[in-house]
Image (cartoon, rainbow, N blue to C red):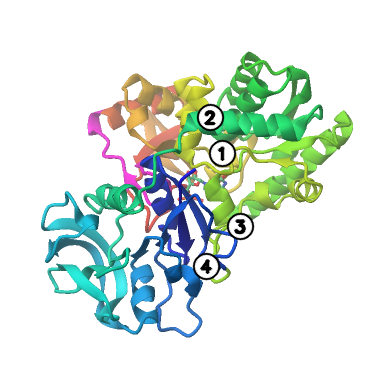
């Protein structure tokens, strides 16, 4: 399949480059920016993209691509650090700007280039850089600049090497998609061979071949990823070979456990192990207020319950399937270069069970090549309902990180009921699909109110609703005030323990999406 290789130098937006290219229908794969290209390039490779980076090219330990890059004869696109790297390493100079250029900037074209084909003069780009190219390396020329007369687009005179100082992968860059399309389809000549249909066919064949007549265990959380894996396994293997385990931590949304069990049953699950571990989870959470401590004890308890149940069911030798996504692989350090900052680690990647299965070659990660949007498309293709596939994300530690302070059964019940009203109202008002993630948070404080003639002392509930593409940044959903007032009124009327409702108007950054 025609492929574009993305060399990752640790930019926050490397993932977006791959996603945008895949959205064009072209397969894109991320590799560490400083890895040897030997063995990475094959007859399917059509071009390379060099990502941005938190480093400056003139820092002595800044990551460098394999010098073989320029002798491959393949088209290269350097983005931000990527273009500075190309220019610096070939004899040009890159220097710090007196002031970082950050935000939107208009780009003015000086000369035509196939990269800029179809783009209007003065298009808006998204800049985020503290360095700039001061003098070009031999053979390069500037074909577009910003209003500050800084180079924005640099091309090589006679080799297919291109550079952008701005970030076409970020949605704030107008026509960013067109730029990437010009590079991938026109300049690299890559064909649109990446689609969910082919992926599904390949992954089913691979699963059948790998698993043979062995059993597969899937730990499902009810989230989109593990549900899609469940659907995939059940559509591929005989139902007798598929064991599904769902651990009810007692920290799920209202009626969630029943709904998950029902859905998996409908998908044809024959061996569905639903484990009610809510007492154990709520017990270990007693007295804990620190969010990271909550996450740690919950993660440990999941692992403990899993191990116990696997032993009880005698399914130790089965394959273990999990819904790891491409983003998880990259973020947990599997794909990025040794110098890139590892953003966060996911507990499903670190668990001893997973490590043991990985070592024994018994780990199945059928979504490991896919981004979230692609998983959703795959889910739809497998016949999952729209409601299931487009469900808002829900964190692994569940409501424990939405109850600030100590978690108690009583608070879980109150929050479940309040949140159910909030979500039901969003759906009723056709707002749910416009929002990327919406939920309620129970604050560890009470405030005074009145009910009839009586003063009431109730909990404060915060409502959150954000729009986002990937959860890395998020904007507040501009809620129509009347909807908020009506929803708040329903919550305080139906849930006597809640006396006041507030709406969170913080974007990410600087706030996070969750409150803990
Ligand atoms: P934040 O709060 O970091 O959230 O802006 C970004 C996205 O990640 C989810 N999230 C988590 N998911 N375990 C998870 O599986 C966690 O501990 C966790 N913390 C946050 C959050 O719901 C949002 O979608």
Residue 475 in the magenta stretch? The answer is yes
> Are the residues flagged by discs 3 and 2 in contact, CB closer than 8 Å?
no
Residue at (37%, 47%) from the top-left corner?
Answer: 20
Q: Earlier in the sequence, mark 1 or mark 2?
A: 1
Q: CA distance from mark 4 to mark 2?
A: 39 Å
Indicate the secondary structure of the residue bearing disc 4: loop
Q: Is mark 4 within 8 Å of ligand 1?
A: no
Whole-percent x, y for residue 71 in the image: 44, 70
Front of the two marks 1 and 4: 4
The mark that comes first in sequence, 4 or 3, is 3
Residue 399 numbered mark, or none = 1
Q: Please tell me whether residue 258 is drawn above or below residue 503 in the rendered image.
A: above
Q: Which mark is residue 201?
A: none
Identify which residue, 298 or 139, lies in the foreground: 139
Q: Residue at x 63, y 29 (%)?
A: 204
Q: Which residue matches tag 4?
A: 340
Alpha-carbon span between mark 1 and mark 2: 8 Å
Front label number (4 vs 2): 4
Q: CA distance from mark 3 to mark 2?
A: 36 Å
Q: Give the alpha-carbon distance from disc 3 to disc 1, as whole Å.
A: 29 Å
* Crowdedness near tag 4: few (<14), some (14–19) or many (≥20) residues, C-alpha within 10 Å: many
The magenta stretch spans residue 474: yes
């Amino acid at each position: 399949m025609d492929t574009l290789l993305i060399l990752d130098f640790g930019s926050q937006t490397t993932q977006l480059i791959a996603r945008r290219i895949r959205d064009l229908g072209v397969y894109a794969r991320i590799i560490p920016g400083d890895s040897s290209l030997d063995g990475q390039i094959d007859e399917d490779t059509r071009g390379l993209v060099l990502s941005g980076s938190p480093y400056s090219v003139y820092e002595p330990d800044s990551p460098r691509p394999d010098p073989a890059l320029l002798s491959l004869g393949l088209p290269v696109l350097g983005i931000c650090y990527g273009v500075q790297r190309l220019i610096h390493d070939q004899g040009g100079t890159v220097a710090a700007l007196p002031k970082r250029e950050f935000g939107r900037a208009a780009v003015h074209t000086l000369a035509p280039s196939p990269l800029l084909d179809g783009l209007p003069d003065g298009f808006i780009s998204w800049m985020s850089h503290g360095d700039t190219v001061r003098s070009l390396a031999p053979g390069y020329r500037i074909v577009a600049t910003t209003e500050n007369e800084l180079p924005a687009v640099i091309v090589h005179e006679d080799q297919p090497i291109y550079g952008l100082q701005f970030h076409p992968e970020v949605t704030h860059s107008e026509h960013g998609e067109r730029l990437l399309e010009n590079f991938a389809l026109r300049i690299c000549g890559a064909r649109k061979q990446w689609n969910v249909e082919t992926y599904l066919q390949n992954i089913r064949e691979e699963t059948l071949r790998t698993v043979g007549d062995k059993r597969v265990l899937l730990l499902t959380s009810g989230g989109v990823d593990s549900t899609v894996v469940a659907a995939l396994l059940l559509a591929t293997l005989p139902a007798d070979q598929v064991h599904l385990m769902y651990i009810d931590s007692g920290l799920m949304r209202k009626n969630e456990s029943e709904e998950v069990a029902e859905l998996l049953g409908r998908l044809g699950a024959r061996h569905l192990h639903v484990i009610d571990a809510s007492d154990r989870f709520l017990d270990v959470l007693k007295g804990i207020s620190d969010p990271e401590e909550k996450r740690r004890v919950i993660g440990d308890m999941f692992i403990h319950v899993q191990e116990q149940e696997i032993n009880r069911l005698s399914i130790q030798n089965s394959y273990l399937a999990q819904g790891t996504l491409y983003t998880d692989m990259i973020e947990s350090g599997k794909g990025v270069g040794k110098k890139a900052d590892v953003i966060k680690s996911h507990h499903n990647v670190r668990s001893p069970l997973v490590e043991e299965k990985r070592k024994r070659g018994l780990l199945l990660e059928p979504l490991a090549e896919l981004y979230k949007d692609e998983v959703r498309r795959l889910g739809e293709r497998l016949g999952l309902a729209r409601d299931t596939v487009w469900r808002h994300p829900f964190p692994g530690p569940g409501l424990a990180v939405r109850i600030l302070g100590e978690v108690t059964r009583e608070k879980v019940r109150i929050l479940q009921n309040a949140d159910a009203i909030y979500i039901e109202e969003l759906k009723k008002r056709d707002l749910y699909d416009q929002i990327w993630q919406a939920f309620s948070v129970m604050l560890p404080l009470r405030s005074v109110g009145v009910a009839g003639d009586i003063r009431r002392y109730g909990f404060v509930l915060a409502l959150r609703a954000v729009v986002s593409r990937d959860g890395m940044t998020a904007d507040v959903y501009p809620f129509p005030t009347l909807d908020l007032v009506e929803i708040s009124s329903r919550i305080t009327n139906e849930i006597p323990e809640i006396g006041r409702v507030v709406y969170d108007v913080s974007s990410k950054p600087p706030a996070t999406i969750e409150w803990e």
